[in-house]
Each structure stands twice: as C-alpha cells, then as structure tokens.
Image: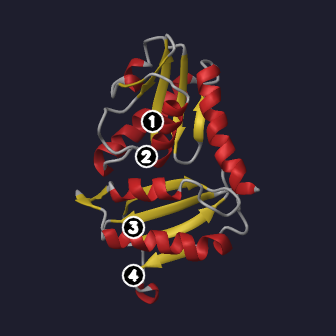
Amino acid sequence: MTDATPDEKSFELGQPVLVCRWRLANRTLPLENRHLRALSQRRVNGAAVSTQLVAWAKQHIEWTLSEGAATAPDGTLMLVVDDRGQAAMSVGPYEALDATSTDALTQRALLASIEGEKTGVAPETLWAVLDGALICGLPEGPAPSGASSLVADLARTLGLCLSHDEALAKRALDDHFDEVFLVSDEHGVVPAADAGGPVAKRLADGYAKLLDAARR
C-alpha cells in the first residue's frame, strides 16, 4: 500500500517532517479514531495539521488499507508528511523491540519527547508505577498519542490512580520505580524487562485484547 497526496502523477515526497507509525491487526487499524484525533493535534512546520490531511488519511485507511495490508496484515501503517505538507502512506511488517530494559525504554521516550516538542504529540511515552499509583510521563492537558489516550482510559476503567509528570523519563534514569513501561503507537504497552509488574501486565493485556478482537 502506497498512497500519496496531492496529484500522484507529479508527486514526489520532500523532506519528511512528521512520521506516524501505527500498529495494525488483521489489516485494520484498531485505534483509528484515536490516531486520527491525535493527528489533528499535530503540527507540521509549526502549523496545525490541516483538516484536509486528516480527512485524506481517514479516506485512505477506510478505502485502501485492507487491500494494501494484505502482505502484512499485522504490520505497521506509516504516514509520512513532508515539509510542503504532502503526505504518503505505506504498510510494512511489524518488528518488535529488541531492547526493553528500563534504560532502553527511557531513551526511546526521551527521543519521542523531542519529537513531541516539534510536532505537538509524542508517539511514545514512558509510564511508571510507584506505591500502587500510576504515573504518565506527559504533562496534564497536552494532546496524547492514540495509544496513550487508550492506556489512560484503561487505567480509569481499572480504577487506577493516575498522575502526570513530564519529567518522568529523566527521573527514571536515576530514580527507582516499582514498574516501568513504554506506551507506543507502534508497539503498544511494553513492560520493562527489568521492571515489570501486575499493573503493566494488566494494561498490556488490555491492549493485546483490542488487537486480538480485530483478528477474529
């Protein structure tokens, strides 16, 4: 699947300034509405993503994704927007993370936070558990990614106490937390190999059930 806007005959993607990587399940995008909502909150070159681009993305997901993802039904949908506001979509195989230690996940979250400062939405965020309370590594208020909004809703459903700390990823380099996990648009909920626990597992299971439901 490769779709582009505007006129495909003259289309040539320029310098990428926004890249979204969204997990698929059975040739569908389980978090479609959440991802599109987050896309509408992103910025390209300092300007808000246009409603036309969001509508184009929605149209191509609904019209061409099933056929385009035939060779990678559980792969990754990638949306790339260039410095001129042009966009392209493609599907590729999903590759799980090789390194899932607290340090590795923290470094990913720190890099994603830099992207979030530029585009308005971080695609990956570090979360932690301390004394039974859940901490999200985002300040309260800014638009979360699709996956982060899902996890926040799951946490509320499970009755977990949720707080926000935008410095969490930096703190995790030195401070100790009972549990640490990454929330990613592409990888879902990823418990740290050296700091997993029951809360992270319950949230990871909740995310996995969503993917499994799409495969039935």
Q: How many marks?
A: 4
Q: Nearer the viewer, mark 2 or mark 1?
A: 2
- Confirm whether residue 98 shows in the render: no
Label 3 element class? helix
Q: Earlier along the polypeptide chain: callout 3 or callout 4?
A: 4
Across and down, in percent, residue 115 comes to 36, 45
- Distance from Cα at disc 3 to Cα at disc 4: 13 Å
Q: Amino acid at mark 4?
A: Pro
Q: Nearer the viewer, mark 1 or mark 3?
A: 3
Label 1 element class? strand
Q: Earlier along the polypeptide chain: callout 4 or callout 2?
A: 4
Q: Residue at x 33, y 55 (%)?
A: 42
- Distance from Cα at disc 1 to Cα at disc 3: 23 Å
> Which disc, if any, is residue 6?
4
Across and down, in percent, residue 141 comes to 29, 38
Q: Earlier along the polypeptide chain: callout 1 or callout 3?
A: 3
Q: In this figure, which residue is indicated by the disc labeled 1? A: 125
Label 2 element class? loop
Q: In this figure, which residue is indicated by the disc labeled 2? A: 145
Quadrant occupied by the C terminus: bottom right
> Which disc, if any, is residue 54?
3
**Counting other residues with Cα less than 10 Å from the Cα at mark 4, is it few (<14), some (14-19), or many (20 or more)?**
some
